[in-house]
Image (cartoon, grey):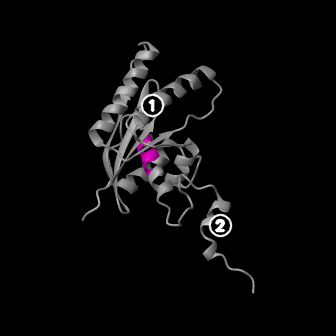
Amino acid sequence: MKKSPQIILGIDPGTIVMGYGLIAVNGQSLQLLHMDVLKLNAKKDQHIRLEQIHRRVAELIQQYKPTSFAIEAPFFGKNVQSMLKLGRAQGVAIAAAIQAGLEVCEYSPKKVKQSITGNGNADKDQVWAMLQRIVTIEEKPEFLDASDALAVAICHHYQTNSPIPGLGTAKSRGWEDFIKKNEHRIRKPV
């Protein structure tokens, strides 16, 4: 019996532009299903925009039936008001995922960039260049928030499918946890 592919929904939260990307994972093969943005009217009430974010995430979940949900955690900036708004946008996207019964995994922007490019300080164009190689896409999206969301989905795949058992998974607790799970691999002095 053929195993159905894992589908990962990645979200790059935003109160004006929210990126989303969906990938299908079949073994080590990654396929881009859909990548786009939800553009929100900055002049509309923030509560209406939050409802639109929740609705769009719920629609994506209903349409694509993802098995995993990954979201970029907001980075800490100097503008407290912007942080609060971004946190709310992230919160309603997470609420839609939880409402659908999905486990939520968060990744820092630095972790996402490092997973995709090997450099946690890579810029958006460097991330885009690597994404083109990973999933063979050519057309650059109008808003790089879409490719950022795709990067979040791929980062989640990499983090939960490490070739080293127990290392790099979202539930890993570091070296101590790895050693406990792999005592049989430790060489003891003779």
Q: Which residue is mark 2?
A: 179
Q: Position of residue 154 (x, y in %)?
A: 43, 51
In the picture of the structure, the residue carrying the numbered disc 1 is: 95
Report the amino acid beneath label 1.
Answer: Ala
Q: From what the image shows, is residue 118 above or below residue 103? A: below
Judge from the rendering whether residue 67 lies leftward or rightward of residue 77; answer left or right: left
Residue at point 65% right, 66% down? 179
Classify mark 1: residues with Cα within 10 Å, few (<14), some (14-19) or many (20+).
some
64 sits left or right of 179 in the view: left
User: Looking at the image, is 136 positioned above or below residue 11?
Assistant: below
User: For the residues marked 1 and 2, what is the alpha-carbon distance in whole angstroms?
Assistant: 35 Å
Q: Residue 65 location in percent, x, y?
A: 31, 43
Marks 1 and 2, the one that precedes in the sequence: 1
Magenta stretch: give its range: 149-154
Query: Can residue 136 be seen here?
Result: no
* Quarter occupied by the C terminus: bottom right
Marks 1 and 2: CB-CB under 8 Å? no
Q: Residues within 10 Å of mark 2 (few under 14, many from 20)?
A: some
Rendering coords of residue 72 (x, y %): 51, 39
Q: Which is nearer the eye, 75 or 140? A: 75
**Residue drawn at 53 percent across, 48 percent down:** 113
**Camera-nearest residue between 115 and 99:** 99
Residue type marked 2: Ile
Q: Does residue 17 appear anywhere in the picture?
A: yes
Q: Which of the 4 image quarters holds residue 188?
A: bottom right
The prevailing secondary structure element of the residues shown in magenta is helix
- Image mark for residue 160: none
For the residue pair 113 and 185, the one nearer the viewer reads as 185
Q: Secondary structure at mark 1?
A: helix
Place of residue 42 in the rendered image (x, y in percent of width and height, measured from the top left):
43, 17
